[in-house]
Image (cartoon, rainbow, N blue to C red):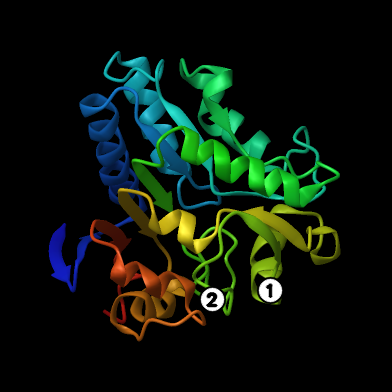
Amino acid sequence: MYIDWVKKMKLIRVKDYEELSKKASNILASQIILKPNSVIGLATGSTPVGMYRALVQLYKNGDLDFNDIKTFNLDEYYELNSANPQSYHYYMNENLFKHVNIKERNINIPNGMRKDIIEECDRYEKKIEACGGIDLQVLGIGRNGHVGFNEPDIKFEARTHIVELDHDTIEANSRFFESYEVVPKQAISMGIKTIMHARKILLLANGMEKAEAIYCTIKGKITPEVPASVLQLHPDVTIIIEEKAALMI
């Protein structure tokens, strides 16, 4: 493991995905232990799976208590039922929620099935504010530099909103579906402004396909064309990357 500071960011380089998952779970566990009623922002996708697995094990060992924790997920596909195995509701239940003692009323994920989707976005945003904001937000990163489902060129001032997914994002997510054609083309996502209001941010990246996005995030100019680049302006960001994702740093 190698720890460096780039601008305001704390950069932790690790040798492999297993170490990445362990370091990430330790950071989340520390947050939960130090503030048992924390509000945690959660991410989905393949990168955080190992982190969730490690958190579940810490809970089973008696080292973590989720009883007073509140969670807000970054995003959910539009018009995908929560019972669908590809929904993020399903993902979170399978990978974390059903294995720990979190209260169902404290779990928050956007409802992509609401008829009035603008109202749903507004409701979600207001609930985050009512809980006092997010203490620690976990992020992954897309090949095109997106965080949540905030695609390139989405304005930094956006709050929770409906998003048209880019071709790169649809293609990357198609591995979870039967084909490219059935991947949802829209999603509800926390906006960049919502993410940037989190008190702490933890960004995870692994795999060679993320190397350019990580380079642009850390060392590139701040631009909506690379949504994650705005993290350079946040006062408390930790980035954990394994060696392949760090090839260009």
Q: Position of residue 25 (x, y in %)?
A: 32, 38
Q: Are marks 1 and 2 in contact (CB under 8 Å)?
A: yes
Front residue of this view, candidates 105 and 138: 105
Please tell me in which quadrant of the rendered image residue 148 appears.
bottom right
Q: Who's the residue at 58% across and 19% down the image?
A: 104
The three-letter amino acid code for the residue at tag 2 is: Asn
Secondary structure type for disc 2: loop
What residue is drawn where x is 43% and y is 76%?
213
Q: Is residue 102 left or right of residue 216?
A: right
Q: Where on the picture, by quarter, is residue 178?
A: bottom right
Residue 22 got which mark? none
Of the numbered discs 1 and 2, the one sitting upstream in the chain is: 2
Query: Is 232 placed above or below 126 here?
Result: below
Q: Residue at x 34, y 30 (%)?
A: 38
Q: Which residue is mark 1?
A: 166
Quadrant of the drawing holding the C terminus: bottom left
- At mark 1, the secondary structure is loop
Is residue 89 positioned above or below 230 on the image?
A: above
How far apart are the alpha carbons under marks 1 and 2? 9 Å
Question: On the image, which quarter does residue 66 sit in?
Answer: top left
Q: Position of residue 158 (x, y in %)?
A: 56, 64
Depth check: give the residue in front, 121 or 13: 121
How packed mark 1 is, by other alpha carbons closer than 10 Å (few <14, some 14-19, many 20 or more), is some
Nearest the viewer among 239 and 35 is 35
Q: Which residue is mark 2?
A: 144
- Looking at the rendering, in which quadrant would you find the N terminus? bottom left
Give percent across and percent down for residue 2. 14, 62
Asked whether 184 or 50 is in front, the reply is: 184
Q: Amino acid at mark 1?
A: Asp
- In this rendering, the count of numbered labels is 2
Circle 2 packing at 10 Å, graded few (<14), some (14-19), many (20+), is many
